[in-house]
Image (spheres, coloured by chain):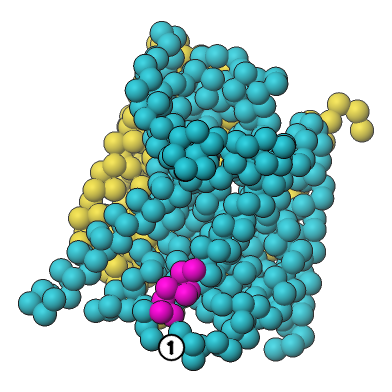
Chain colours: A yellow, B cyan
């Protein structure tokens, strides 16, 4: 059951990501990204991380992508023109992407024992709630990174306000 | 049902539940429209629809037939796929979130809960997530219509929904802190001990959260006094200007289905869901499984009905906000008050236990 969902939505995520690249209108690309986010949420869910799945849908698909589409609509961005692009991008781009893919898969495969593993749907029936576990980790062992991240976001917000204001 | 396996029973009962809930929700949507027209009429010293059937009770059917028979116009300059997709997203998302709502007390038949389609342990987040996806329907409809009024309407709607979503989410945190779970059934169960006294709005001291939720939810569903996206005096009809026939009807149904969802969530989170306001005082009167099940559904429907009336009453009473007032109200009033509410609830819970 879970393996079928995993394969279906994994393929959907890849297809939507490719569609994102090939679509020429920014709105269509943004909508493809929404599909990618939602498929990722299903993948998280099928691994038993239901809180992460819900957060993915609410934060990424529901808030951030809406903001993207809002900006695209507000700026009235039209279809992008086909350009030939730079030669360097053609020469380096595809081998570079391939190299990054190989590097990442090598790192994940060689560190497999360190990263640990999970079975599909293995945590779905467990009695321990995701939220309890996540909040426990966030507020004990990962407290410093958590707070530093929130400070970083606060600084970014203040910076945006400063840039947006004409006079200060 | 002895010759069926557990999975078959689960499967058949689930399909039955989905069909029944879908039909009831759609009928509820149709009759909420009638309720609005009647009640609004009486607020304004007129009768409202009264010609079709007794007291105008068949009016929704005739309305539906009219919309169904109208010509489905498709302007030439629209972005065709998105123009068709938008009403489907709007109505689909509006109907999906009803799936996690528990309508009555837990009544198990062969291990299947009769009064709830799916008891998800993150039910509240499912409702929030589906609602936040529903905004794509409005956004895309305005953009794909290729009409400046539609675009203005959907821009306003998007900005409004993003702004009020924060206050809406934060206003519910107090309830979640008290219940200690995100499951809607669990939240209802945490309020059933002493009737109305243990409901979150009274015994839980969540009335601040409740009023923030109510205002933010009115803004989320684009209802008066937050109906700027379809302000008919400025924007013709806002985001659905170019829509006709069944596509328009889908937006219309989505709006009312969202109203019903908001009423359901307010009932579940703040008014004890399907629990009786008298607690267990009158349990001996309706003691069997069937009477108590019917009674719990009665209480749930009565509360939802009350919230729908409140929706219409507010629409008949309050004038529309101006755009800057809307933004100020959301960001400078609702959001800080919601945060203070979370802090106060958390401190009180930490102090008492």
Residue that lies at the very extreme toward the bottom in this rendered image: B284
Query: Hey, which residue is sitting farthest top in the picture?
Result: B76
Q: Is residue B55 left or right of residue B195?
A: left
B47 left or right of B241 in image: right
Q: Nearer the viewer, residue B282 or A42?
A: B282
Q: Give the vertical position of A62 relative to B336 (above or below).
A: above
Where does residue B343 sit, x and y in percent of width and height?
77, 69
Quadrant hosting residue A36: top left
Image coordinates for residue B335, horizontal then vertical, percent: 76, 53
Instruction: Answer with left or right where residue A153 lies relative to residue B32.
Output: right
Overall secondary structure of the magenta section:
helix
The boundaries of the magenta stretch are B291-298
When asked about the image quadrant of residue A86, the answer is top left
Query: Foreground residue, B209 or A149?
Result: B209
The quadrant of the image that shows the C terminus of chain A is top right
The residue to which callout 1 is attached is: B287
Asked whether residue A57 is in view, the answer is: no
Chain of the residue on which disc 1 is drawn? B
- Whether the magenta-drawn stretch holds residue B294 is answered as yes
Q: Is residue B352 visible?
A: yes
- SS at mark 1 in the image: loop
Q: Position of residue B336 (x, y in %)?
A: 80, 55
Q: Residue at x 43, y 62 (%)?
A: B100
Quarter residue B321 falls in? top right
Q: Residue at x 63, y 44 (%)?
A: B39
Taking the magenta stretch, the answer to whether it contains residue B154 is no
Judged from this view, the residue extending furthest toward the right is A168
Q: Quadrant of the N terminus of chain A?
A: bottom left
């Amino acid at each position: 059951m879970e393996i079928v969902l995993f394969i279906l939505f994994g393929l959907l995520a890849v297809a939507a990501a490719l569609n994102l690249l090939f679509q020429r209108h920014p709105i269509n690309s943004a909508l493809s990204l929404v599909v990618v986010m939602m498929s990722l949420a299903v993948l998280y869910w099928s691994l038993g991380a239901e809180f992460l799945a819900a957060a993915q849908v609410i934060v990424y698909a529901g808030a951030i992508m809406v903001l993207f589409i809002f900006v695209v609509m507000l700026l009235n961005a039209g279809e992008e023109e086909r350009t030939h692009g730079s030669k360097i991008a053609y020469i380096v781009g595809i081998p570079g992407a391939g190299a990054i893919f190989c590097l990442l898969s090598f790192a994940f495969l060689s560190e497999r024992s360190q990263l640990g593993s999970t079975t599909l749907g293995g945590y779905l029936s467990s009695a321990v709630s995701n939220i309890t576990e996540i909040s426990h980790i966030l507020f004990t062992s990962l407290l410093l990174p958590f707070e530093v991240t929130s400070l970083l976001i606060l600084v970014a917000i203040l910076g945006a306000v400063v840039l947006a204001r004409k006079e200060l | 049902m002895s010759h069926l396996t557990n999975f078959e029973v689960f499967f058949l009962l689930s399909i039955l539940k989905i069909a029944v809930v879908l039909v009831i929700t759609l009928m509820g949507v149709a009759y909420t429209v009638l309720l609005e027209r009647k009640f609004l009429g009486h607020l304004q010293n007129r009768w409202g629809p009264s010609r079709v059937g007794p007291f105008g009770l068949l009016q929704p059917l005739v309305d539906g037939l009219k919309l169904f028979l109208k010509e489905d116009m498709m302007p030439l300059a629209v972005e065709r796929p998105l123009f068709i997709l938008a009403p489907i997203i709007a109505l689909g998302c509006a109907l999906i979130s009803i799936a996690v709502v528990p309508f009555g007390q837990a009544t198990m038949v062969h291990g299947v809960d009769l009064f709830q389609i799916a008891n998800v342990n993150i039910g509240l987040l499912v409702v929030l997530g589906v609602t936040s996806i529903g905004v794509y329907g409005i956004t895309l409809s305005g953009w794909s219509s290729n009409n400046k009024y539609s675009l203005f309407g959907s821009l306003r709607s998007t900005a409004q929904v993003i702004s009020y979503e924060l206050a809406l989410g934060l206003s519910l945190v107090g309830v979640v802190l008290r219940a200690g779970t995100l499951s809607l059934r669990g939240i209802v169960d945490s309020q059933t001990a002493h009737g109305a006294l243990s409901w979150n709005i009274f015994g839980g001291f969540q009335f601040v959260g409740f009023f923030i939720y109510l205002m933010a939810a009115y803004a989320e569903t684009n209802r008066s006094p937050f109906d700027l996206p379809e302000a008919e005096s400025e924007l013709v009809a806002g985001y659905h200007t170019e829509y006709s026939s069944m596509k328009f009807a889908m937006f219309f149904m989505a709006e009312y289905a969202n109203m019903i969802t908001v009423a359901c969530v307010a009932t579940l989170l703040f008014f004890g869901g399907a629990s009786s306001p008298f607690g267990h005082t009158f349990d001996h009167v309706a003691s069997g499984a069937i009477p108590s099940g019917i009674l719990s559904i009665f209480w749930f429907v009565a509360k939802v009905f009350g919230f729908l009336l409140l929706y219409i009453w507010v629409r008949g009473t309050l004038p529309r906000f101006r755009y800057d007032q809307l933004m100020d109200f959301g960001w400078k009033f609702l959001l800080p008050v919601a945060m203070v509410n979370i802090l106060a609830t958390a401190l009180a819970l930490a102090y008492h236990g």
